[in-house]
Structure formats: C-alpha cells, structure tokens
Amino acid sequence: MGYAEKRGDYYRGRFKIAPGKYGTVCDPATGAALKYHTRREAKQAADDEEAKVRGGTWRDPAAGQLTFGAYVSRWYAGQDLAASTMQNLRHHIEEHLLPEFEHRALAEILRADVDAWERKEKAAGYADSSVRTWRGTLHVILEDAVEEGLIGTNPARRRRGRGKRAGQTRHWGPEKVITDPVGALLIAERAALLAGRDDEFVAVTTLYYTGMRWAELVGLETEYARLRSIRVEHQLYELDTGELVRCPPKDDSYRTIDTPAFLAKLISEHIARTAPRPCACHGRTYVFRGLGAPTGAARRPGAKLVDVARRAGVSTGTVSNVLNHPQRVAEATRLQVRDAIADLGFVRGGTDAEPVAHWRRGSFGAWLFHPAVTGWYPRKAPQDARPVPLLAEPWPGIPVRGRNAGGRAGASWTPIAPGLTPHGLRHSHKTRMRELGTPPKLMDDRLGHLDGSVQARYDHITAPMRQRLLDGLTEEWETALDARRALCPRSPVTVLDDLLRGRERRTADSTRPRPRRALQEVAQ
C-alpha cells in the first residue's frame, strides 16, 4: 500500500515500485513531484500509482523527460530496414519532425501539438498525402516509445469520427495518367530519338508490356532476361547520394514475368547489339546502360572541336559550319576539315569515354521521358520550358541540338499523354490486363502484388491463362504497329524501322493471291 510523507507544509505520495524501491507521485507531463495539502489526498494518489504498478500499466514520468531528438536518434540507429526505407525515414525525421519536436520532452508532446503541426505543414503547401506519411512516421516512433514505457499513450494516434465526417474522399488525388499501346509506341520512338539510340525504345516498350518497376528495369541483369520470360531478382535503388544500391525488389516481390515473343526478341536482339559488359559499381552485367558520358568525361583524353580546328588551321566557327552548314564553306576548306576529323577520330557531340553504367531516374524522366510525352523540355535556369526543336523530316521529326537549335528547327511535337510518368506505364499495363480480361491472380503475379484475401488463396494460375494474356498483348502490339505504319511507313529509329518493314512484308504476303493448284491435285 502507498503512504503519505510529510514534507514541510505539504504531503507527497510514496508507493512501492519493486522490493526495496519506492517512487514518488509525479506529474506525468513534467516529471515534477506533486504536492498535496492533506495526508488523505497524498495516500490516495500513492495507492492509485501502486495499483498501476501491480497491474503492469505504470510508467516512470522521469523517462518521458527524454527529448524527442535524443530518443529518435537512438531509435533510428536501431532500425535495420532496406536502404530506401532508411533514406525516406531520415528525410521525414530531419526535414519535418525534428524542426518541430526535437527539443520537446516525449511526455510534453500532446495530441493537440501533433494536430497543430499537421495543419502547419499543410498550410506550407505540402500535399496531404505527404503530410499523412510524415505523421505515420511520427506515429511509429512514438508507438515504440510507448512500448518502451517512456510515455503512456501515443499522441500521434488518430481519433476517428471527430470533426469532419471521416472518409477517404478528401484524400483522393488526381487520377494516374495512362496511355494506350499506340501512345506507348510513339513515346518509345520519341525517347529513342531524343537519346540518339535504340536502347530507350526497348526500355520503354519493356516497361509498358511487363509492368516492371523503374528500379527493377534498371537492375535487370542479362542472366535474368530469358527466352520467354524475365525473372525479377533485384532492383537498383537510387539513393540521394547518387549511389545505386543493388537490393531485393520492393516487398520481396520476386517473380517471373512471361514475355510475349515480340518483346523477348526485342530484348535479346538489344543485348546482342549492345554487348553489355559488367559495370564497375556492382560487377554485374545489366541489360540496359545509362546515357551520356560519366562525370569528368570532358576532362579525359579525346579529340575536341578545338583540336580539329587547330589541325585544319581554321577557326572553331568554320569547323562548326562544316558540321552544321557545309554549303557555307568552300569545297577545299570543307575537305581540309573532313581530313582533320578523320585523322583525329573526332566524334560529333561525343567523347571517347564509355557511357554511364546506369540511368538516373531524374535525368531519364526530365530529359527523355517528359519531352517524349509532352513535346517540351523542362525548365532549367536560365532557360524556361521550351518545345523540343525538330527537323520535320523524316517523320516524326529529328531533335535539333547545338547552337541556335530553335532557329534551325521547323517543327515540334504535340503532346501524347501529358502527366504520364515512367511509373504510369505500370498503371497502363494493369489497365491493359484488365481490358483483356486477365484474372486478378495473374495480374497480381505479374506486378508483384500480394493479395492476402481468402478468395485469392483459393485462386490459381494456369498455363492457358498465361497464354491468353500473351496472345492479347501480342495482338495489341501488332495493332499499334499497324497504326504507326499508317502514320508513316518508315522511322528514323532503326529498331522500329525494322519492325515496320517486317510488318509491311507480312501484310503483303497475307494479301498476295495464292497460286492455283495443279489440275491433277484438284482432281485428286
């Protein structure tokens, strides 16, 4: 039983915590000992605290005086999660939680404080979904503090049915933009034109017809690109530091994705054409490589424009005119510059360095995918957003680069699916499967989703289901090729041009009249 202890002109409550150990009734918020005017009040409070001790619900108020900053540092160091999750947690904590709660004692953080912080974040212009994510992180941290006995309740826990009517309708954001097979084909063609190679055409097509995540595509190794399937074993997750971490796919969604014959052929021919080599960062051989020279390539040995000018004994402007406007330069000078280019092995707009090993999500999305989708380059100081300058022929146009590109251009692209992102291709693939009547179990299997319902447990995938899906995707691909061929029968993208030519030959063969059988065969 607790007891009251006389302390000058007041009483304090004392109660037994453990054999030989007694505690004092304290204010749970501040940890300061409570003072009572009467012995009865002090004893009652002490009895209540001792009842909590016996019931296993007592919390030491002094423990709650640990600051949020000190606790969260210890908490974060004790987590053992995926590199991507650790990075996201660090952002949430350092950028949004610590500025508000770092120097607050855990016991001093009240529900009203958390609600006020949430309103302030929303008022600052952050999306509701982002603020909910940060509050979820705060909830997890404080819930662990509750389990450790540092605080009694979690102030970040949401109360339901208070204030506005509960529901998810006010959390809905804009619908994800998707595209159809023809749109995906045109986007893939434009991305290849912007990159100046076929790799991006194959990559965008692979994303659309497999539903792979971006990091899974970048991390696809040649040994897992098989004859009629792709095995998802790893992903390359890009950290803020620029490091690409080779780790398991999201939520351990290891899976085998069946690929239509046309896609398997695209990928195998791409591997044969590019002959990928192991990268320096992981020592693994990946199907796709990055675009552009590595950082510092400009400082590496190799012929530059100024070297050609010196070799030919002309100005750099004359060399530029030979490359861009040869009709402006005298024949003798033009031949002199051409000889210098051949002697030095100069590559226009290039470098002798190998391309970077991997794409970067930001640069791929901003300078290849976004312009292919919208027809506009994004804003980059000091330049504003601007249309992609094009030479109108051959269709759909060749991006113009270099000095006065806008002045030399004669056309620009119209938007295909404004707002579409590389992840939107994953949504598009799910939509195509839905339109083809694919069973939910097979859709989840391809996308790496897990349905824990009883219905899904008793649902199974069969070989005919897989074949029907592949047949449907193949039909949509061939229809998209026919639609593209109707716009223009040729393409400046080599791999697509070969596909269009092949489609033209097959169409011609199917419409060619068959020779009549020999009379004796008819008689038989």
Image: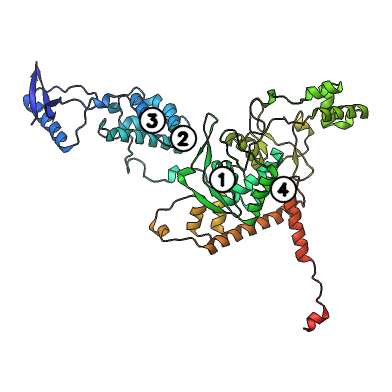
Question: Relative to 288, does residue 341 appear above or below in the rendering?
Answer: above
The quarter in which the C terminus is drawn is bottom right
Q: CA distance from mark 2 to mark 4?
A: 37 Å
Q: Which mark is residue 434?
A: none
Can the viewer see residue 193 in this picture? yes
N-terminal-most mark, 2 or 1: 2
The tag on residue 424 is: 1
Q: Is residue 87 left or right of residue 268?
A: left
Of residue 212 and residue 47, the one placed in the foreground of this image is 212
The disc at residue 76 is 3
In front: 410, or 516?
Answer: 516
Q: Earlier in the sequence, mark 2 or mark 3?
A: 3
Residue type at tag 1: Gly
Report the amino acid beneath label 3.
Tyr
Q: What secondary structure is found at the residue carrying circle 4?
A: helix
Tag 2 and tag 4, C-beta contact below 8 Å: no
Closest to the camera, between mark 1 and mark 3, is 3
Helix, strand or loop at mark 3? helix
> Which coloring applies here?
rainbow
State the separation of the CA atoms marked 1 and 3.
Answer: 33 Å
Cα–Cα span, label 2 and label 1: 24 Å
Question: Which residue is located at x 67 percent, y 31 percent?
Answer: 293
Quote the CA–CA distance across marks 4 and 1: 24 Å
**Cα distance between the residues tagged 3 and 4:** 49 Å
User: At label 4, which amino acid type do we have?
Assistant: Val
